[in-house]
């Protein structure tokens, strides 16, 4: 089917899913960040319409990255999909219900001129942006701690925790990293697409959330280093086989999530990129180099996500209940044939999607102004 053996296909799909998660966080991340700022940066109805219309034409296309990432996890890592969507059911429903506010908020907000009507939908859009950004960070925090699930001898998955256990201090700190990072990203995008008072407020907002992101990212790194035990594979079978997750041995060790940075020193580029991206994006935003600031903000997101991914490698979903039940990229995957077919489809269509997305943003480039909203008041959001 492909030129790669099963072991290499497993590694390739770890990379592909990472690319999809980064792509989703960058593309839909600024949508969520802009929506989270809506009630605060728009002081008048016209200003809020400007903010909404900076993302109004692209948010639906950007959200398909989330659908694609979910579909890829389902097809490539079925055990991860099953364990996560059963154990994290309430948290994922919370995200889903929050996302419901986005389409109705965009479509219905301007149907009536009543200020109370529009203000209500503005807060609905805020929920649709801020809640998913927070919950996704909380989810990553719980992955680093380990989720309370295990497999029995028949490979049935059992979740032993509750929704409230997910809201532990470290996970909430990771949620703060995610929320501040995406709000910084959204503020920089607003600075790029808006003008006047909205642009000036967005510049200040980016500075505040950028500082919060840097501080929370630092605290999370220190917590992982000194306060959380990581997971380490101590034995694994032939990586070219479809491995039973229970056939390996795993141990929890102090500083376990730092081992990869000693084994593969180049991985340190991920947190460096995260911190450098924050500094350079804020510096560029200060000097009004909005496009450069957006690029560096995107690099920040990539660096933060890769820091978590590199730290956990090869673990995908560690188990705090029974470490042996932890899922890795080697033993949570589909068959070799499935991964091979998906690989061929991906290398054909992913570049096409990226080219099309670039073309769309090129066509829609430019500032959204109050005057443009007034000139198109019946067609704009």
Image (spheres, rainbow, N blue to C red):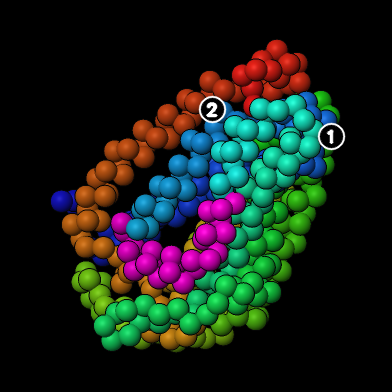
Q: Is residue 230 visible?
A: no
Q: Is residue 221 magenta?
A: no
SS state under label 2: helix
Pick the residue in front: 146 or 303. 146
Q: Is residue 238 visible?
A: yes
Above or below — where is 178 with respect to 64?
below
Pick the residue in front: 216 or 108. 108
Return the x and y of residue 247 as percentages of the image width and height: 28, 83
Left or right, 225 with reference to 61: right
The quarter of the picture where residue 76 lies is bottom left
The single residue placed furthest to the top in the displayed view is: 375
* SS majority, magenta: helix
Above or below — where is 221 with respect to 366?
below
Cα separation between marks 2 and 1: 27 Å
Above or below — where is 281 with respect to 196?
below
Query: What are the residue bounds of the magenta stretch?
Result: 75-98
Binning the other alpha carbons within 10 Å of mark 2 as few (below 14), some (14 to 19) or many (20 upward) gives few
Q: Residue at x 50, y 76 (%)?
A: 147
Q: Residue at x 53, y 23 (%)?
A: 362
Q: Which residue is mark 2?
A: 361
Q: Which mark is residue 342?
A: none
Q: Residue at x 46, y 72 (%)?
A: 87
| Camera-side mark, 2 or 1 | 1
Q: Which residue is mark 1?
A: 43
Q: Earlier in the sequence, mark 2 or mark 1?
A: 1
Q: Is residue 82 magenta?
A: yes
């Amino acid at each position: 089917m492909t030129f790669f053996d099963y072991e290499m296909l497993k590694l390739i799909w770890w990379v592909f899913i990472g690319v999809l998660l980064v792509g989703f966080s960058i593309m839909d991340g600024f949508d969520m960040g802009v929506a989270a700022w809506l009630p605060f940066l728009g002081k008048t109805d016209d200003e809020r319409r400007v903010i909404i219309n900076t993302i109004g034409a692209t948010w639906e296309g950007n959200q398909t990255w989330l659908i694609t990432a979910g579909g890829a996890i389902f097809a490539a890592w079925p055990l991860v999909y099953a364990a996560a969507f059963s154990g994290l059911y309430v948290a994922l429903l919370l995200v889903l219900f929050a996302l419901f506010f986005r389409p109705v908020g965009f479509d219905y907000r301007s149907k009536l001129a009543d200020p109370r009507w529009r203000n209500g939908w503005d807060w609905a859009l805020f929920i649709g942006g801020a809640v998913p950004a927070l919950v996704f960070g909380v989810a990553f925090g719980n992955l680093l701690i380990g989720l309370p699930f295990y497999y029995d001898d028949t490979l049935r998955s059992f979740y032993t925790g509750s929704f409230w256990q997910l809201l532990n201090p470290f996970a909430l700190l990771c949620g703060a990293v995610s929320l501040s990072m995406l709000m910084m990203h959204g503020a920089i995008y607003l600075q790029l697409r808006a003008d006047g008072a909205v642009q000036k407020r967005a510049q200040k907002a980016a500075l505040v959330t950028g500082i919060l992101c840097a501080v929370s990212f630092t605290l999370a790194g220190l917590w992982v280093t000194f306060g959380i035990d990581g997971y380490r594979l101590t034995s694994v079978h032939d990586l070219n086989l479809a491995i039973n997750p229970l056939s390996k041995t795993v141990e929890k060790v102090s500083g376990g999530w730092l081992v990869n940075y000693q084994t593969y020193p180049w991985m340190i580029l991920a947190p460096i990129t995260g911190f450098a991206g924050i500094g350079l994006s804020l510096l560029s935003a200060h000097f009004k180099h909005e496009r450069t600031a957006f690029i560096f903000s995107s690099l920040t997101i990539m660096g933060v996500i890769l820091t978590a991914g590199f730290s956990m490698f090869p673990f995908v979903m560690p188990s705090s209940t029974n470490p042996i039940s932890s899922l890795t990229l080697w033993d949570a995957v589909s068959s070799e044939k499935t991964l091979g077919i998906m690989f061929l489809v991906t290398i054909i269509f992913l570049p096409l999607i990226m080219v099309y997305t670039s073309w769309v943003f090129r066509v829609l480039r430019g500032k959204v102004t109050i005057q443009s909203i007034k000139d198109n008041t019946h067609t704009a959001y």
